[in-house]
């Protein structure tokens, strides 16, 4: 039984269920000076009705205003790439700050979710160009690494062939076989150096 004295006391009903509160779009300037509009949704509930009524005039309005300022403050410390890629981390950071600030009001903030991050169309085009440049850079790096690996393998193959005359002869025959399949009308047959060397030495002796 609760006795209420008319004219002295009033009864206030407090909903203890989870409240879903929409945070209106906020203008945020990121750490890299990019202007975006961000909105979010906050889930909270009253865990101490007495504090929620006595400690703050309007706990719903106070929580809404605090959520807006916290959203701008937290996101303003991060760059645009972090906002887009690390949304879960930002949600957790905002939730912890709100939960700590509203604890004195008897309110428990259970979750915060960033819904949309709206970017200016000119900035969207700039981001697309940046992504294209990054893909081009990666393609060039991969191509250069492939050329380097191919050059290293060619050097290793050359070293092995130079140590084995028989392997060099086999490679020569393979080259001749592949040239014979060519449809060109003119074929130049290179002579191995070990065949020409005796004639060169004989010519030197005759001189």
Image (cartoon, helix red, strand yellow):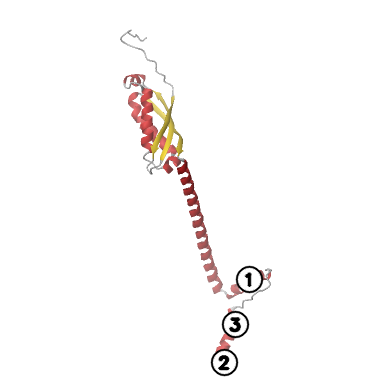
Q: CA distance from mark 2 to mark 3?
A: 16 Å
Q: CA distance from mark 3 to mark 1?
A: 19 Å
Name the element at disc 3: helix
Read off the residue under disc 2: 206
Q: Is residue 19 above or below residue 198?
A: above
Disc nearer the start of the sequence (2/1) = 1
Could you say which disc has been placed on residue 175 in the image?
Answer: 1
Q: CA distance from mark 2 to mark 1?
A: 34 Å
Residue density around tag 2, few if under 14, some if 14–19, many if 20 or more, within 10 Å: few
- Identity of the residue furthest to the front in this view: 122
Identify the residue shown where x is 37% and y is 24%. Answer: 61
> Are the residues tagged 2 and 3 within 8 Å (C-beta)?
no
Read off the residue under disc 3: 196
Q: Quadrant of residue 162?
A: bottom right
Q: Is residue 139 left or right of residue 52?
A: right
Identify the residue shown where x is 42% and y is 38%. Answer: 36
**Which quadrant: the N terminus?**
top left
Identify the residue shown where x is 50% and y is 53%. Answer: 136
Q: Quadrant of residue 175?
A: bottom right
Residue 107: percent from the left, percent from the top?
37, 25
Residue density around tag 1, few if under 14, some if 14–19, many if 20 or more, within 10 Å: few
Q: Is residue 81 above or below residue 112?
A: below
């Amino acid at each position: 039984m609760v006795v209420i004295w008319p004219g002295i006391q009033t009864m206030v009903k407090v909903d203890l269920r989870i409240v879903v509160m929409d945070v209106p779009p906020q203008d945020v300037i990121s750490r890299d000076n990019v202007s975006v509009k961000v909105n979010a949704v906050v889930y909270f509930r009253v865990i101490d009705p007495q504090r929620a009524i006595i400690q703050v005039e309007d706990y719903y309005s106070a929580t809404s205003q605090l959520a807006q300022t916290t959203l701008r403050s937290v996101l303003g410390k991060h760059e645009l790439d972090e906002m887009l890629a690390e949304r879960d981390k930002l949600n957790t950071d905002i939730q912890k700050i709100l939960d700590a600030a509203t604890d004195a009001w008897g309110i428990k903030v259970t979750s915060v979710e960033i819904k949309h991050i709206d970017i200016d169309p000119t900035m969207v085009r700039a981001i697309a160009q940046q992504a294209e440049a990054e893909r081009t850079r990666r393609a060039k790096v991969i191509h250069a690494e492939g050329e380097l690996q191919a050059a290293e393998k060619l050097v290793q193959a050359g070293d092995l062939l130079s140590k084995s005359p028989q392997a060099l002869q086999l490679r020569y025959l393979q080259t001749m076989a592949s040239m014979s399949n060519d449809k060109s009308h003119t074929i130049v047959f290179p002579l191995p150096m070990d065949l020409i060397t005796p004639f060169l030495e004989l010519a030197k002796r005759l001189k």
